[in-house]
Image (cartoon, rainbow, N blue to C red):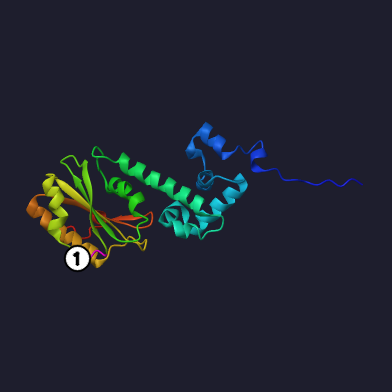
Amino acid sequence: MTITFSVSPRIRELPDAPHPRQRLLSQGAGALSDAELVALVIGNGELEQAQQVSQRLLTEAGGVVGLQRLSIEELQQHDGIGDVRAARIKAALELTRRLVIAGFDERFQIRTPSDAAQLMLIEMSHLDQEHLRVICLDTKNRVQKIQTLYVGSLNSSLLRVGEVFKEAVRLNSAAIILVHNHPSGDPTPSADDIQVTRDVTAAGKLLDIDLLDHLIVGHGKWVSLRERGLGFSG
């Protein structure tokens, strides 16, 4: 009796499973899954092992947005991720962040709350402190400047409303949009968020600079106070 052993081929040897690198080259990066993209970034070693590490990492981190929130030290706590792989992942994520920001220059026009949210979501979803940003807009709602005004808990009693409009006045802006993040990941507006919106709206009327919206960013999610009718009269 002849005994035969079945040996599973490696992924790169399967004729019906092209190497992700080859699919990227022939079909574009959009054809690859998140795990395959991360596997190509971390490189080194067998592809199958890299994909297993990547899939496990994404699952534990909560997806790409969660991955972006992790520090170098936190990445290294995951199995299969050493200092080199952690550095490669952070470098790739940082390049993506910079590319998105560079793409939204002063010619970018905001037509809807979603436009403003997509402009800020990638950068602000992963911040571990609360940041307040002011988007200054011209008469056609084109972005003039995005200013980081405040870092720390947003408190209506401590916020100096004059500072919110200082750059907008200098740029002769027609309108502004406030954007801040909730590090907890839940973008539900607080009482302070609503009060800040009321205060800034009232000050804007005196200065003839409209507050178009106040957005709150969570982990991959956002809320428009304008759409919810919170803090805006009429």
Q: Is residue 201 visible?
A: no
Q: Could you tell me which residue is drawn at 70 percent across and 43 percent down? A: 9
Identify residue type, mark 1.
Ser
Residue ID for mark 1:
156
Residue 152 lies in magenta, yes or no?
no
Q: As drawn, which residue projects farthest toward the top?
A: 26
Q: As drawn, which residue projects farthest toward the right?
A: 1
Q: Could you tell me which residue is drawn at 35 percent across and 60 percent down? A: 128
Mark 1 residue crowding within 10 angstroms, few (<14) / some (14–19) / many (20+): some
Q: Could you tell me which residue is drawn at 55 percent across and 52 percent down? A: 55
Q: Nearer the viewer, residue 233 or 44?
A: 44
Q: As drawn, which residue projects farthest toward the front?
A: 83
Is residue 5 shown left or right of residue 130? right
The kind of secondary structure element at disc 1 is loop
Residue 82 % position (x, y) = 52, 54
> From the image, which quarter does the C terminus lie in?
bottom left
Residue 155 % position (x, y) = 22, 66
Q: Nearer the viewer, residue 12 or 92?
A: 92
Is residue 147 shown left or right of residue 99? left
Residue 167 % position (x, y) = 15, 49
Is residue 164 shown left or right of residue 128? left
Instruction: Assign the magenta stretch its main secondary structure.
Output: loop
Q: Quadrant of residue 233?
A: bottom left
Q: Nearer the viewer, residue 33 or 85?
A: 85
Boundaries of the magenta span: 153-157
Q: Is residue 11 visible?
A: yes
Residue 126 % position (x, y) = 37, 56
